[in-house]
Image (cartoon, rainbow, N blue to C red):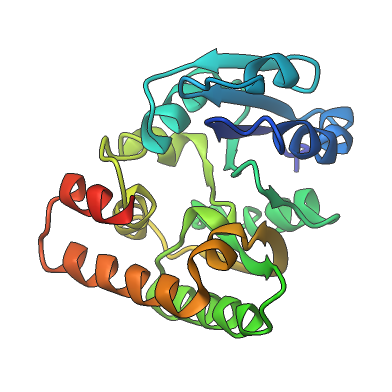
Amino acid sequence: MAPLRLSIVVPVLNEGERVAGCLQSLAWLRERGAEVIVVDGGSSDDTVALAQSGADCVLQAPRGRASQMNAGAAQARADTLLFLHADTRLPDDALQAIETALVDPRTHWGRFDVRIDGKPALLRAVAWLMNLRSRASGVSTGDQAIFARRSAFLRIGGFPDQPLMEDIEFSRRMRRWSPPACLRQRVATSGRRWERDGVWRTIALMWRLRWLYWTGTPPEQLARLYK
């Protein structure tokens, strides 16, 4: 089997405090041939300047993760796409894990388990439940570092053009082609929102948003509630 060719798309917005660390953590993957594409959604800080030295390409796109990730995917040259938040870190064996998952030609996409870094001990339980729910439902969230074959990504039209729940809708569409590869290796994501807004309050908000989405509430209305 030919070596895995990987393009990593990182959507950013005012991530000046984190983007350099994120790109530094991806340097070893660039050394192994991976392509790193940063897509800025109109930052007002020094995000773009800081990203220039650690990425193969820095793009501008309309604000919104879906729009930004689609723009990055459109410029990607590799056969496999990985979508990574700026506050999320990949495990050391990420490349091998993805390669192994995609050995089966029937597998078109997947995601990692997640660990939420932060002081509240409850975050460990939250992460465990997120991984369990995702494995049972076949629905992945952006925090879990979604990856996909480029061909499958293009087949479904990429991420839907909506301001929230784009990862949920993406999962729905991808499941028509194959269930996700749910990798046991864990990415580490920041618990900053959980710590800032409170764990229980954030849990309640997330479940409310999911319920409203499943019952047909427009994503634009959900985005206002999220903010």
Quarter occupied by residue 177: bottom left
Q: Residue at x 46, y 24 (%)?
A: 41
Front residue of 159/21: it is 21
Q: Position of residue 74 (x, y in %)?
A: 46, 20
Front residue of 40/122: it is 122
Task: Give the residue furthest to the left.
Answer: 216
Q: Position of residue 139 (x, y in %)?
A: 40, 66
Front residue of 183/128: it is 128
Above or below, 218 against 216 in this view is above
Q: Position of residue 160 (x, y in %)?
A: 28, 39
The quadrant of the picture occupied by the N terminus is top right
Q: How many marks?
A: 0
Above or below, 221 against 136 in this view is above
Q: Residue at x 59, y 76 (%)?
A: 127
Left or right of 64 in this view: 72: right
Q: Residue at x 66, y 19 (%)?
A: 46
Above or below, 211 against 110 in this view is below
Quarter occupied by residue 15: top right
Left or right of 209 in this view: 65: right
Quarter occupied by residue 77: top right
Q: Residue at x 80, y 16 (%)?
A: 53
Q: Position of residue 133 (x, y in %)?
A: 45, 79
